[in-house]
Image: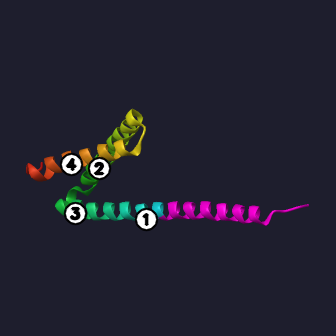
Amino acid sequence: MCSWPGRDVAIVRGLVHRWTKIAGLIAGVILLDFGVQAGHVSNQTRIYALLPEARSRLNMVYVISYFTAGAIGSYTGTLAWSISDGPASVDWAGASRSRSYHSVFYEEGGW
């Protein structure tokens, strides 16, 4: 049986390239998970310092707000993607939403 050595090298390179992409994706997911967890811990630390006797109620409001904001973000990202079929529109939707939240909470005195 005749084997072409270049073909075998190309197959190995392709496999290595795919696995390095997958390893990068896994590392990114782990880093994002650590970041989200650190954000939760710091936010809950601040919330629990407000009224120690109302921890469960404050935690409920925090979790509902976090879930609602995530759902709205997912919806607007999906809507922007479906309208223009590209990641640039999703970036613009997220940036405009962040800018509007910043103007409400920081420039006008907040709630």
Where residue 84 sits in the image (x, y, percent)? 39, 36
| Amino acid marked by disc 1 | Leu
Q: Which is more toward the observer, 94 or 111?
A: 94
Numbered disc 3: secondary structure = helix
Q: Earlier in the sequence, mark 4 or mark 2?
A: 2
Asked if marks 2 and 3 touch (Cβ < 8 Å), the reply is no
The disc at residue 31 is 1
Earlier in the chain: of badge 2 and badge 3, it is 3
Label located before the other in sequence (1 or 4): 1
Reading the chain from its start, which is encountered first: label 1 or label 2? 1
Residue named by callout 4: 99
Q: Are marks 3 and 1 in contact (CB under 8 Å)?
A: no
| The magenta stretch spans residue 39 | no
Residue 110 or 89: which is nearer the viewer? 89
Task: Identify the residue position indicated by label 2 in the image.
Answer: 60
Q: Position of residue 26 (x, y in %)?
A: 52, 62
